[in-house]
Image (cartoon, rainbow, N blue to C red):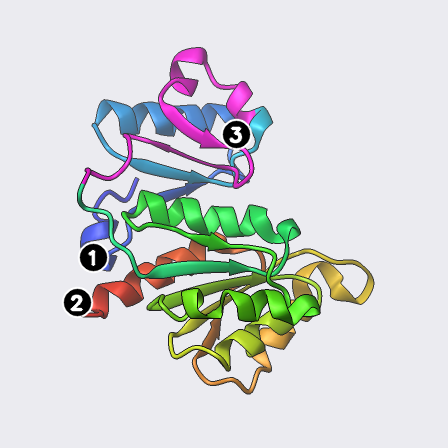
Amino acid sequence: MDWERERRTGVPEAVLCASKSGTQIQAILIAAASAGRRLLFTRLEPAAVEALAPECRALLDYDPISRTAWCGGPPPAGTVRDGVGIVAAGTSDLPVASEAARTLEFLGFSAPVIADVGVAGLWRLMRRLEEIRGFRVVIAVAGMEGALFSVLAGLVDAPVIAVPASVGYGVSAGGTAALHSALASCAPGLLTVNIDNGFGAAAAAVKMMGKIKD
């Protein structure tokens, strides 16, 4: 494990579980716990958690919606920072938004999620706009055509990190249409990560916040 990553980059090691066996995940968890390290696990399916030994499951704070877990407990009390907000177009986007939120929480940031404000009902977004404008960095999650990204980036002065979600059907193509929408946007200050990459968006937001002076 790369325990020096946080010192170098500002973001600690995390474990992508999707391509790992249960034996590998359990070995990593035991090593982290034995060393007294906090560690974030992403793309950890419920079945993989159930396959762990009971004493290993007891070490994890697991959330099945985001498919994330961590060991080592939450950040120390009194150290949690504000400033990053997550905006999700629809409730179908919540698994990806939750991955971003849980990553932020692990990294020591509060993670408010404003959900179901997609542009199909633009009044819902406008009703929450002043709240959204209070964030220093905004993570926006949307599938389908991804229209939320450009609309939101044209309404706030904070950088917006677009997370295309693999929500939709037909020409939505598993999030590709939303990704193309984010990449082709004419709204300045809009950045994008890969499809469903809530972790990557949260890590980028934390790095941005690390360069913002209070």
According to the image, label 1 marks what residue? 8
Instruction: Note whether 113 is above or below 23 in the view shown.
Output: below
Q: Residue 49, percent across and down? A: 51, 24
| Local SS, label 3 | loop
Label 1: how many Cα within 10 Å (few below 14, some 14–19, many 20+): few
According to the image, label 3 marks what residue? 21
Label 3: how many Cα within 10 Å (few below 14, some 14–19, many 20+): few
Is residue 146 in view?
no
According to the image, label 2 marks what residue? 214
Instruction: Say which amino acid is labelled 1.
Output: Arg
Instruction: Say which amino acid is labelled 3.
Output: Ser
Mark 2 vs 3, N-terminal side = 3
**Residue in the picture at 48% in, 70% down:** 129
Instruction: Say which amino acid is labelled 2.
Output: Asp
Q: Nearer the viewer, residue 27 or 163?
A: 163
Is residue 109 in view?
yes
Q: Residue 209, percent across and down? A: 27, 64
Residue 197 lies in the magenta-colored region:
no
In this image, 113 relative to 75: left or right? right
**Residue in the picture at 37% in, 39% down:** 40
In this image, 77 relative to 175: left or right? left
**Quarter in which the C terminus is drawn:** bottom left
